[in-house]
Amino acid sequence: VSWQTSERAFLASVLELRAQLEVLHDHLSPQTLVKVESALATIDLAIAEGREALLRDPSNAALSELLASNYRQKIELLRRMTQLASST
């Protein structure tokens, strides 16, 4: 299933960015970290709901794009936070 192949690529990016952010964790304020984790939790919920829907209807292109969009949003947030942490 093509969306699962795409998901593996997204997950690899997420894991890499999470690892980078973890190294730079101390460069961000506790308040920023709380907000980032809250935003990530919201995105993760949307990802989980999208995955469940795609498991029921794996050929649905709109659901596949929605899931990809949620992953892109997560990656962009992690990328921004990593850049912010590395610049401080």
Image (spheres, rainbow, N blue to C red):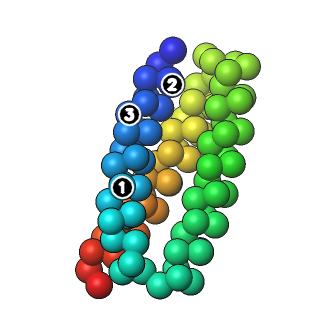
Q: Amino acid at mark 2?
A: Trp
Q: Secondary structure at mark 2?
A: helix
Residue 50 rendering spot, x and y as whole percentages: 66, 36
Q: Amino acid at mark 1?
A: Ala
Q: Secondary structure at mark 3?
A: helix
* Circle 2 residue: 3
* Circle 1 residue: 19
Instruction: For marks 2 and 1, give the CA distance.
Output: 24 Å
The residue shown at (67%, 47%) is: 46
Given contact means CB atoms under 8 Å apart, are the residues at marks 2 and 3 in contact?
no
Looking at this view, name the residue that lies furthest to the left: 87
24 versus 20 height, above or below: below
Badge 1 density bin: few <14, some 14–19, many ≥20, Cα 10 Å: few
Q: Secondary structure at mark 1?
A: helix
Badge 2 density bin: few <14, some 14–19, many ≥20, Cα 10 Å: some
Instruction: For marks 3 and 1, give the CA distance.
Output: 16 Å
Q: Earlier in the sequence, mark 2 or mark 3?
A: 2
Residue 52 rendering spot, x and y as whole percentages: 71, 30
* Circle 3 residue: 9
Instruction: For marks 2 and 3, give the CA distance.
Output: 10 Å
Image quarter in which the C terminus is found: bottom left
Which of discs 2 and 3 lies nearer the camera? The answer is 3
Given contact means CB atoms under 8 Å apart, are the residues at marks 3 and 1 in contact?
no
The residue shown at (62%, 42%) is: 47
Residue 13 rendering spot, x and y as whole percentages: 36, 44
The residue shown at (54%, 69%) is: 36
